[in-house]
Image (cartoon, grey):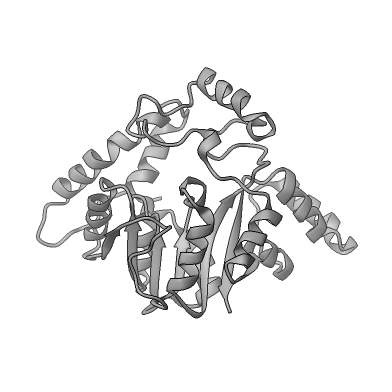
Amino acid sequence: MDTTPPTVEGRLDGDLEAEIAARIEPWLQHMYWRSDFEAWRQRRLYQERYQGEKLSSVRACLGPPAGRPVLDVGAGMGGFAVALAREGARVTALEFNPAYGPIIRLRGRRYGLELPVARGAGERLPFPPAQFDLVCAWDVLEHVQEPQAVLQEAWRVLRPEGAFLLTVINRWAFRDPHYHLPFLNWLPRPWAEAWIRRARRGKQDSAFADRQDLSDMHYFRFGRFAQMAEAAGFRVEDLQERRLRQGSLSSRRPVRRALRRILRPLGLEVPAYRLARSLVLSFYEVVLWKS
């Protein structure tokens, strides 16, 4: 992936890149334990260049995004919002952390973009009803205070036939996506948090020191989440299952590809996926349709 600083008219590239790096660096310290930290750090600095899969999901739900109003809830450091704005979408970034707003704006200026950035929480979106064709919330739902309120607010600000595209962490994920430890979610929460501390994967000494422990986050079984979404008025669709049915679900792992070739003629590919979704997958990628 090319990480050459892009040209920004009217400002030295080095100045802009140095400011972005200085603002992002404090939010990376809790991940120093990673063996691939330097490569991971580059992906954080240039997040907008690693959004291909998410952009594909947007196109699957929305079609060409150019000109379409999109709300990115919990925009973080703005990688996805900027990538989608570069595709021509009319993106509004919503972020609760006040330190992230300037990072989003600076990231946009790499490409001559001035993104609207609002501060707020998903439980109370500061927008009138029926404003957006698409709402996105990547890696957000597990961190909010009231997941049901977030679903209801997304329904409110979507236009008729709009879509809410989000990720949901599996309560029984084999490998926890936040702490990168296997079996963590199969243990009682006090045991799991003791293991996190022992493995030095906590965030107590970082800029995230005020953030949630594992027991404070919201992980869901797929069926339980689907019930919540339907109660908010949505129709639920698993995007990975859709891709599987369409034959467009790809995998980098040869074992998985070989297993699918065996299961497909037997009509067992979807049941096997649903079993894996329950017991193995770290998260679900879901689109909720407003009818």
Picture coordinates of residue 77, whole percent (x, y): 33, 50
Q: Residue at x 53, y 65 (%)?
A: 57
Quarter occupied by residue 121: bottom left
Q: Is residue 91 left or right of residue 176?
A: left
Name the quadrant of the C terminus: bottom right
Picture coordinates of residue 237, whole percent (x, y): 65, 67
Q: Is residue 56 visible?
A: no
Q: Is residue 52 left or right of residue 234?
A: left
Q: Is residue 106 visible?
A: yes
Q: Is residue 236 left or right of residue 20?
A: right
Picture coordinates of residue 207, whole percent (x, y): 32, 33
Residues 78 and 230: in front is 230
Q: Is residue 23 left or right of residue 132?
A: left
- In the image, residue 36 sits, relative to residue 120, either above or below, namely above
Picture coordinates of residue 248, whole percent (x, y): 66, 66
Q: Residue at x 34, y 29 (%)?
A: 206
